[in-house]
Image: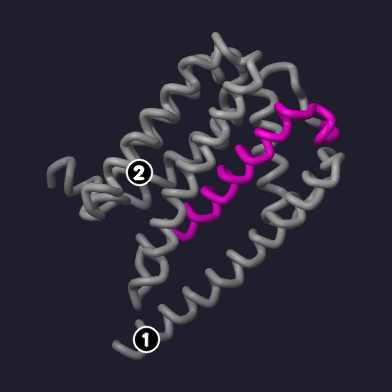
Amino acid sequence: MNVKEIVKNRKYELLLLALLQHLYIGIVVRDLPFYIEILWPINMVILGLASVGVFIEKGKVKNIVKNVLTLIVIGFPVLLPFFKGIPTFMHLLNLSYIVFFIFIFLEVFKFLLRPRYINTDIISAAACGMFLLIEISVFTFQMWVYSDTNSFKGINYTTPAHTFIDLVYFCSITLTSIGYGDITPNVHYTKLAASLIGIAGQFYSVVLVGILISKFTNSSNHT
């Protein structure tokens, strides 16, 4: 089996691993300057490569858009040490990431709706969908955080790495309805947005359960 076949056959497993390392690699990395200046660009290269399989056989236009977005989201963290104090740069960075992850999420969700069976691809794609929602939420909130540091209580603004990790934590516990309360939205738009992503997390879970039950039922009926 060559590399292209591996990427095509294991595309959702590869994407899932790439999302996990991007969001949660801070669990094992204690040096946050190294995390933000070295690992983040590497993480985005890994994510860009891991998302290639999702767009195999999806048409030339989609692949061009995906490749352009990948180059943009790799380029921004490379430039971050030089422009991190400039609000416009941070807005563009976060906006590009939001578009990048929404683009991938829509493709993953379309795949979840298609097959009438359950296999490892379906399970991996379902997990990817949840982590992609976390990514989208993180960079949406991060746009507001860099516009107004009072938009949240409990966020660490020491470095971009601290802020990113705090938002990954906040969005993860909000989407899963855990909600410890140590980080809280502090203005009306972040309160409403936090409510909305909580609803989105529950809606995704309910829809996903319905999709999986339907596929399982179809699989049972054909055996």
- Which residue is found at the position 42% from the left and 85% from the top? 217
The secondary structure that dominates the magenta segment is: helix
Q: Which residue is mark 2?
A: 51
Numbered range of the magenta stretch: 125-154
Residue 206 x/y as whole percent: 61, 71
N-terminal-most mark, 1 or 2: 2
Q: Quadrant of the C terminus?
A: bottom left
Q: Amino acid at mark 2?
A: Ser
Q: Secondary structure at mark 2?
A: loop
In front of the other: label 1 or label 2?
2
Furthest residue toward front: 88
- Which residue is found at the position 53% from the left and 41% from the top? 98
Q: Nearer the viewer, residue 207 or 218?
A: 207
Instruction: Look at the picture and state if 145 lies above or below 220.
Output: above
Furthest residue toward left: 1
Q: Which residue is mark 1?
A: 220
Residue 86 x/y as whole percent: 63, 16
Q: Nearer the viewer, residue 93 or 155?
A: 93
Within 10 Å of the Cα at label 1, are there few (<14), some (14-19), or many (20+) other Cα atoms? few
Q: Nearer the viewer, residue 160 or 176?
A: 160
Residue 171 x/y as whole percent: 68, 45
Q: Is residue 138 magenta?
A: yes
